[in-house]
Image: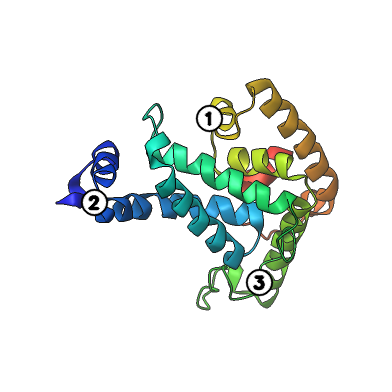
Amino acid sequence: MTRNLDDSSLVQACRAGDAEAYGVLVERCQGRLYPMVLRLVGSPEDAQDVLQDAFVRGFEKLDQYQGGSAFSTWMYRIAVNLAMSRLRKGRLRRALRLLAPGRGRPALDPADESPSSVPSYAVERAEREALIEAALAALEPDHRAVVVLKDFEGRRYEEIGELLDIPVGTVRSRLHRARQQLRRRLRPLVDDESPVESSLPDVEQALS
């Protein structure tokens, strides 16, 4: 019965002491929050820690949620702030660690006759992803956040401003500077004439 309620009703149920209601809210949000947090902090372990802290914080501050925005948007803001705070304080083992094989990356597809089946495909794709991850790691947290929210999450400038609590003009200026830095660092990737497709087309499109 609880799972059929909308988010607003679930929040009210949770405030009334229904712990299951908050569990449903978590289930609805975590699938969308995790990729964003992972891009910000760089490792699956740290992303899970931040996400867990975010949901604990959300539960503790549930009485502060006024319903002016979607509950998921409210949780996005909490998760982004926690991730950026974690980065700024230097409590990560690395600010943005390259993802190790088999940890947070999808497994390689079974061998087939497509271009991706050639032996060099996985290596070239991994090299491209490593370049992008390293370029993101070099960005300041404030700049990294706008890139992740815009080019990976596809959010509008107004939404990003709301999530980060900054003016839209600041969002645009940070994104412009961040893309300039990425363009310089990813020049070898952008100039590469290899037929291997990037797994992160949004970033390449932003740099085109």
* Residue 152 appears in the rendering: no
Neighbours of disc 1 within 10 Å: few (<14), some (14-19), many (20+): some
* Residue 187 appears in the rendering: yes
Callout 3 amino acid: Ala
Separation of residues labelled 3 and 1 (CA atoms): 35 Å
Mark 2–mark 1 CB contact (< 8 Å):
no
Neighbours of disc 2 within 10 Å: few (<14), some (14-19), many (20+): some
Residue 134 occupies quadrant: bottom right
Q: In the image, what residue occupies the spot 52% across and 43% down? A: 78
Q: Circle 2 — which element? A: loop
Q: In the image, what residue occupies the spot 66% across and 38% down? A: 146
Q: Nearer the viewer, residue 158 or 90?
A: 90
Mark 3–mark 1 CB contact (< 8 Å):
no
Which residue is tagged 2? 18
Q: Is residue 94 above or below residue 191?
A: below
Left/right of residue 38 with respect to residue 206 in the rendered view: left
Q: In the image, what residue occupies the spot 79% across and 34% down? A: 177
Separation of residues labelled 2 and 1 (CA atoms): 30 Å
- Nearest to the eye among marks 3 and 1: give it: 1
Q: Is residue 45 above or below residue 172?
A: below
Callout 1 amino acid: Glu
Which residue is tagged 1? 159
Neighbours of disc 3 within 10 Å: few (<14), some (14-19), many (20+): some
Residue 169 circle label: none
Which residue is tagged 3? 122
Farthest residue in the left direction? 1
Q: Circle 1 — which element? A: helix
